[in-house]
Amino acid sequence: MLAVLQGIILTMLYSRTPDSFIINLNDKEDDFLFATERYDRKILDTSKELMGKKVPLRLHQEDFAQALGITASQKYEKNGKDYLADAFELIKNYSSNPIEDQIRLWDLCIFNYLIGNTDNHVKNIALLYSEDLKGIRLAPAYDLLSTVIYDSSTEKMSLNIDGEYDIRNINQKSFENEAKKLGLGKGIATQHFLSMVEKFEMALEQSTYELEEQGYGVAVDIQKQILKKAGIHNFKLTNP
């Protein structure tokens, strides 16, 4: 089930995530693997060979817990902390393209809200270094899933939006206030928020259809749960 869920979400974000696909092992709905391309590996013309195969170059990745000096045990933000502001400040100061990477991180925050991913802690966002270690960019999105569809999950986001953690209490105004705190232009921040909201259900519907056509019937149930429990549901309640 988790692989199908990841498949739905990653298909929706295909342009900002590594190439991913589902492998069915024995033609059974519950017997499959989710595979994704390693974006932190690169085959070069100059790569060495081992047993007739080129050895990929390992690109250095640094998650935001490491970059901000946060221990793994503190990856979930607590009241009084503001990891998101720290992450944006880090991008402003060190990214090779700070404007684009700030927008990409902002979009990721919106997406995590819409799908109900409350496991959006600072080890699940990262910086990716260039081959020569001189360039730094926001890494492609990874570990994306809708956690709120599980009964054992929490509605508490790992990173606050305008001081609020409970996804049920976060709305468009919360994002507008957060954008102001982060130093993002209200116009472009709100435009991205509303654009993603507008496209969300259609993208989810299309992704669900594609997976259902491949024989993963459980995708329909997951789609219904996302629309019932995730941030997109809260948005529709406050914006009828």
Image: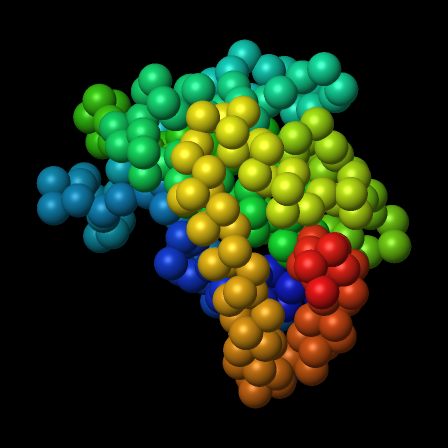
* Whether residue 159 is visible: no
Q: Residue 166's image quarter? A: top right
Give how far across and how far down residue 129 sits, in percent.
31, 29
Q: Is residue 61 left or right of residue 216?
A: left
**Image quarter for residue 184?**
top left
Q: Residue at x 54, y 74 (%)?
A: 202
Q: Which residue sits furthest top?
A: 69
In the displayed structure, 31 sits above or below 15; it is below
Position of 15 relative to 48 (above/below): below
| Residue found at x 34% / y 17% | 93
Q: Position of residue 157 (x, y in %)?
A: 72, 38
Q: How is the image coloured?
A: rainbow
How far across and down, in percent of the image, does residue 26 sit?
63, 79
- Residue 149, image quadrant: bottom right
Q: Nearer the viewer, residue 45 or 131?
A: 131
Identified at 37% across, 46% down, the residue is 39
Is 25 or 74 nearer to us in this picture?
74
Q: Residue at x 78, y 43 (%)?
A: 169
For the N terminus, the image quarter is bottom right
Q: Residue furthest right?
A: 151
Res 74 visible: yes
